[in-house]
Amino acid sequence: MKIAIIGAGNLGLAIARGIINNNSASSLFITKRNISTIREMETTPKVHLSTDNTEAVKNSDIIIFAIQPRHLESVLVQCKEFITENHTLISVVTGYSTKKIEEVLGEEHHIIRAMPNTAISIGQSMTCICSNIQGKVRIQVALNIFNQLGHSIEIPEEQMQAATVVCASGIAFWMRLIRATTQGAIQLGFESKEALEMSVHTCLGAANLLIQGNSHPEQEIDKVTTPGGCTIAGLNEMEHQGLSSSIIKGLLASYNKISQIAKK
Ligand SMILES: NC(=O)c1ccc[n+]([C@@H]2O[C@H](COP(=O)([O-])OP(=O)(O)OC[C@H]3O[C@@H](n4cnc5c(N)ncnc54)[C@H](OP(=O)(O)O)[C@@H]3O)[C@@H](O)[C@H]2O)c1
């Protein structure tokens, strides 16, 4: 696979590192306007640094656009004459629909959108992927790339905003839950460093019980809630205080906000 990453910023570089670490490209073109900030990558085998997006497009099969939304249209226009139907185009640009990309390039192209989260920097992103009609046949190409950088699923494009809330904003929501359990642990007498360690690893274990055990949260809760015991007392008090309800309302508030922003 000959891959190009147009825009080597936070996300573009994280994707590049995942591709390099997994040795999944036969060549990897990485572009940005000022390549002096990524000079250290110059000696990496198979990697080509360039300021010329068209050179990257001409020499690659898969083009990943990782630039800011305000730059995408001009970059697409710049690359248009070199983009063919053999290319798989993957955009990680937030809020930029496949339809808008089609309007610049034409609907005959294989266009895929991906929404990763910040855990992509450590290869553990939850990434949601959708495509235009032509792109359907290449969706597996994108899933393969993002599965090397965490876990990925295909969703309908209409759900991309909701997925942004659940998975991208979701990082912040989970951080708050971890912080809250840390604060509780400190009140119970643990040092803050210890409290955070306990909270984070309990969270990781809980997630892995679901992933590796292929189970449901309530099944795991049943295993730790002795009738009349301390866990159910704590859990019910949290629910009396509105734990589940406040999280659901928070997700809906984020979704309403992202929908308003998208309409502007
Ligand atoms: N960060 C995340 O976790 C995340 C998650 C989901 C989606 N996204 C989306 O991904 C995109 C990139 O985000 P980011 O955080 O990586 O942004 P960023 O750090 O600002 O990176 C954008 C990069 O694009 C380069 N660039 C700008 N104009 C260019 C051009 N004409 N040709 C080639 N490169 C160009 C910039 O470098 P130069 O100035 O040197 O050209 C910069 O390194 C955004 O649309 C964002 O909404 C980000």
Image (cartoon, rainbow, N blue to C red):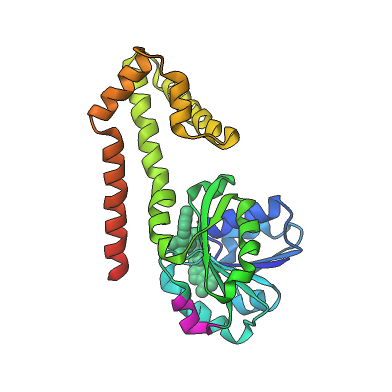
Give x and y (percent) for residue 132. 52, 73
Is residue 77 in sight in this rendering? no
Query: Which residue is depicted at the point 63% across and 68% down?
Result: 138
Residue 98 image offset from top left, x and y in percent: 48, 73
- Residue lying at 58% horizontally and 32% vertically, measured from the top left: 213
Q: Nearer the viewer, residue 30 or 97?
A: 97
Where residue 154 appears, x then y in whole percent? 54, 59
Give whichever of 193, 230 is nearer the camera. 230
Above or below, comparing residue 191 to residue 54 in the picture: above
Q: Which part of the image, by quadrant, shows the C terminus?
A: bottom left
Q: Which span is picked out in magenta?
A: 99-107
Q: How many marks?
A: 0
Q: Residue at x 36, y 31 (%)?
A: 179
- Quadrant assignment for the N terminus: bottom right
Is residue 73 or residue 50 the one in the foreground? 73
Image position, residue 172 (x, y; %): 38, 43
- Depicted 29 relative to depicted 171: above or below: below
Asked whether residue 102 is drawn in magenta, I would say: yes
Q: Is residue 55 visible?
A: yes
